[in-house]
Image (cartoon, grey):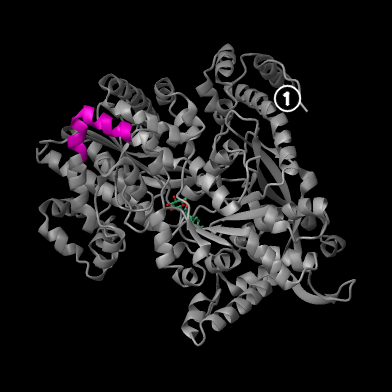
Amino acid sequence: MNFPLASLDSEVLRHLNYSLGHHSKTVNHSYVYRAFAIAVRDRLVSNWLKTQERMNASDSRRVYYLSLEFLIGRSFSNAVHNLELGDAARVVAHDYGVSLEELAEQEHDAGLGNGGLGRLAACFLDSCANLELPVVGYGIRYEYGMFHQHIENGRQVEDPDHWLRDGNTWEIERPEDARRIRFYGNTTQSIDADGDIRQVLIDTHDVLAIPFDMPIPGFKNSTVNTLRLWKATATDVFDLEEFNSGSYTEAVASKNSAEQITMVLYPNDASENGKELRLKQQYFLVSASLQDVMASWVKKHGEDFTGFAEKNCFQLNDTHPACAVPELMRLLIDQYGKSWDDAWAVTTSCMAYTNHTLLPEALERWSVRLFGKLLPRLLEIIYEINRRFLKTVAEQYPGDIELQRRVSLIEEGHDPQIRMAYLSIVGSYSVNGVAQLHTDLLTAGLFSDFYKMWPGKFNNKTNGVTQRRWLAHCNPELKDLLNETIGDQWQKDLSNIKKLESSAEDAEFRVRWREVKHVNKQALAKYVNENAGVEFDPSFLFDVQVKRIHEYKRQLLNVLHCVHLYDRILAGDTQGMTPRCVLIGGKAAPGYHLAKLIVKLINDVASVVNSEPKAKDWLRIVFFPNYRVSAMEVICPGTDLSEQISTAGKEASGTGNMKFMMNGALTIGTLDGANIEIREKAGAENFFLFGLDAAEVKKTRENYRPNEIIAADPEIRRVMELVESGHFNQSEPGIFDILTRGLRDAQDQWLTIADFRSYIDAQKRVSSVYQDQEQWSRQSIINVANSGWFSSDRTIGQYADEIWKAKKL
Ligand code: 26W
């Protein structure tokens, strides 16, 4: 099945004419982009269909990656790159008077995720396609993705992100695969055809799930995998009662309430807010996806599910899709008439769970009351799972009532809660953390009771990122230099990048290395100027922290350091100082007031510093608005110093840290998450370490006296006094008091003041190494040469071998 395609230029013209209805070549860039995108997409279609056939024919186990978030960003240049269409596309674009880069910028980011967890899912899909693994992503097609952020008077303002406004070339609607999702109602018993008692759900409110498929192209191979995103819509059977009572319009309007389910992505990345609509989204995704997978099983194997788990596996991206455990039980028992024991054997052999956070406030719990109202049958099943589980605990550890209370799937209290992480652990055969430290902390802390019961269930899979997006196509200058130096195999297999290491000692190579960085810094400076109106000087050190704004990530520590530099500049103490451009970017959850106040502080410090003539030659600060995937593609190639400064024990892994490393930045960081592994691979001498480690953090909390630290260190004291005096915001006295009081509070969870001195000293080491450009280049090259471990191809290889037991197509 090869569909004949003409040359790219005639295909683009044909789509401009016949798909979009435009005739001239002077049409606007948006239409040219769309014609291009369709022409590129056409080149994926036959391999896409073939990949589906190969998947159906293969007897490998198939994997379904269930995630409420896929932060894929743009697809156009990714597809052009993977199909090796770059040269041809450049020429055709030129005919339309536009560069390929300008065309690419026409595409809206698919911002269907918050941050790390969603972007990881996108990198994983890319790696699965590169490795030709039979993996399908299942997610939600949010009408509105992550909000757009702009800054007004230093504060974050959110605007809706209607990313589908100009259409989405990369999706194909498949109404024939629609699934019915049932909410609310009551459970009752009935007798089935065999005379057996069955639980049935009646009086439900039903919604349809319509799939939209997006192609995920492999790199220079013929594999095109699928990301299937579900959209909610009304069933066309209208509510008869409403209909007959003359409420025709009301009945039609109910369409609206169905479509609400997939209207908007929840923009919280660390605290679950317990909203019913969010639980609806979770169940909607899970039920539609499981029904989809089971329907294709039944088509091939009939209703015998004994071999199902051997051939199918569901990876749960955090607990957001944890309803998959009781939903698979429900489908097997209620729909296909299986016994509890058979259903449980299948379920616990095909579910695997990844945890992405240690923060207690991010651990999902659902009120039993709310859950039982929305999903009454699932609640019954969860109770039964728990009853049986606690019975085995009682048998294994007789008399340990306290243990039973601790591990129960239900947290008792005046408003009992379902613990979704525990449900996921009990229902899965594999539980993993996302960096070695994170996994160690999980098994020793949060999940220790379960680890003692089932040590073999737990494993680590250190995160990774795709070097195709995060090196080859975001940093073409470096790509070319690498290809010339070590060949181009690293794009397929990043372990090859180790060959670069010897070039660190080659002085001519280091000159070229710096030339590449310089070009990227110029591009970043231009981008900063266009988006934030601040001039960055490419001869300064570019010091960057971009990620969600959160107390534990300690953007505050970064700002305090900026204030310290500013204080030194004002005092004329610039001995040994290195001129810096500091860039901070990221979104705060709309309801997270402290995080929003941190954004305001960064902006206010930036505006005072940037308008101080004495600071001009030493320090520029910018808060970069609306940080997103496509912004990172410009930011990471131009970065010298990567800020990874979370309180040790809080950042599960981090993945931005890996993108910066691949692009030649050096890291200043704590012993947290994957920073530890980055430092191990790069060598301690090529990493700027500071701060308490996770064990010390725990110990320090017992007797923490930040005020004494502040009083004893004049430099720190002056920084606090500058902020507290209102120097950075004269018109709103006391506005930052909540922040400074938090820093001085003995209960401060994040120990910012405890790490401040060590951070200042590490930044001094950064400054002095940067002044030796030869040394900086050596260390930068060594970092890149040792970034092979952080390819998501390595991570996915481990998931495939150790958890999924899935084989290459
Ligand atoms: C709405 C509730 C909620 C709660 C937690 C939404 C999202 C979360 C995620 C677990 C937050 C998240 O993105 N975690 C990040 O996952 C990355 C990929 O594993 C890690 O690299 C980051 O360290 C971790 O913070």
Q: 211 or 102: nearer the eye?
A: 211
Indicate whether 519 appears above or below 790: above
Q: Residue at x 40, y 54 (%)?
A: 436
Q: Is residue 668 left or right of residue 767?
A: right
Residue 586, image quadrant: top left
Reply yes or no: does residue 665 show up in magenta: no
Q: Residue at x 42, y 61 (%)?
A: 358
Mark 1 element type: helix
Which quadrant is home to the C terminus?
top right
Three-letter amino acid code of the residue under disc 1: Ser
Indicate whether 303 appears above or below 36: below
The answer to whether residue 146 shows anywhere in this view is no
Residue 90, image quadrant: top right
- Which residues are drawn in magenta? 766-782
Which quadrant is home to the N terminus?
top right
Q: Residue at x 63, y 74 (%)?
A: 385
Report crowding for label 1: few under 14, some 14 to 19, many 20 or more residues within 10 A (C-alpha). few
Which residue is disc 1 drawn over?
19
Q: Is residue 432 left or right of residue 555?
A: right
Q: 622 or 226: nearer the eye?
A: 226
- The x, y position of residue 170, in whole percent, is 65, 34
